[in-house]
Amino acid sequence: MERIAFYGTLRQSFGVQRKLGVERWLSVLGPCVISGRSIKHLGYPGLVPGDGEVAAELYEVLDPRAFVILDDYEQFNPMDPAGSLYVRKVVGLLTPDCDAWVYFANERLRR
């Protein structure tokens, strides 16, 4: 099962999933917690690896076509991660005890 966790504007309450047309390809599993640190200087939600805890929503990915649309929205190019705004990585969540894809702000933006 592929899972993805959203901590920013892709959370259900913002309506972006519906606007992008990926809502039908995702099934909400519930709340989750990601290890990391929220950064605010970008002007939009960002998450970087760290020892903090960030509340998020966990989803099952029902159709892998969702990744194409989500990657485009997050400006992640799998062929050029270093040049992408966000980088999608599989990480172990703090809760629940499972792995999920998470979009992290690219390292170059932290400087």
Image: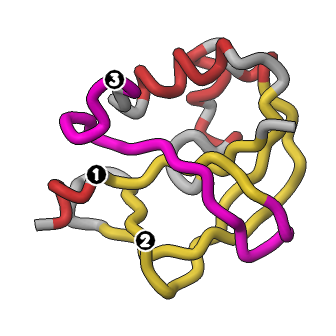
Question: Which residue is the site of mark 2?
Answer: 49
Name the outermost residue toward the front. 79
Q: Residues within 10 Å of mark 1 (few under 14, many from 20)?
A: some
Question: Which residue is the site of mark 3?
Answer: 79
| Position in image of residue 43 (x %, y %) | 24, 54
Q: What secondary structure is found at the residue carrying circle 3?
A: loop
Q: Nearer the viewer, mark 2 or mark 3?
A: 3
Q: Nearer the viewer, mark 3 or mark 1?
A: 3
Q: What secondary structure is found at the residue carrying circle 1?
A: loop
Asked where in the image residue 24 lies, by quadrant, the reply is top right
Q: Earlier in the sequence, mark 3 or mark 1?
A: 3
Magenta stretch holds residue 97? yes
| Position in image of residue 95 (x %, y %) | 80, 73
Q: Earlier in the sequence, mark 1 or mark 2?
A: 2
> Which of the two residues, 41 or 63, is positioned nearer the viewer here?
63
Query: Above or below — where is 64 with respect to 107?
Result: above
Type of amino acid at the residue the image marks with label 2: Pro
> Which of the two residues, 35 or 24, is positioned nearer the viewer here?
35
Q: Residue at x 43, y 71 (%)?
A: 49
Question: Which residue is the site of mark 1?
Answer: 106
Name the outermost residue toward the left. 111
Magenta stretch holds residue 87? yes
> Which of the two residues, 1 or 54, is positioned nearer the viewer here?
1
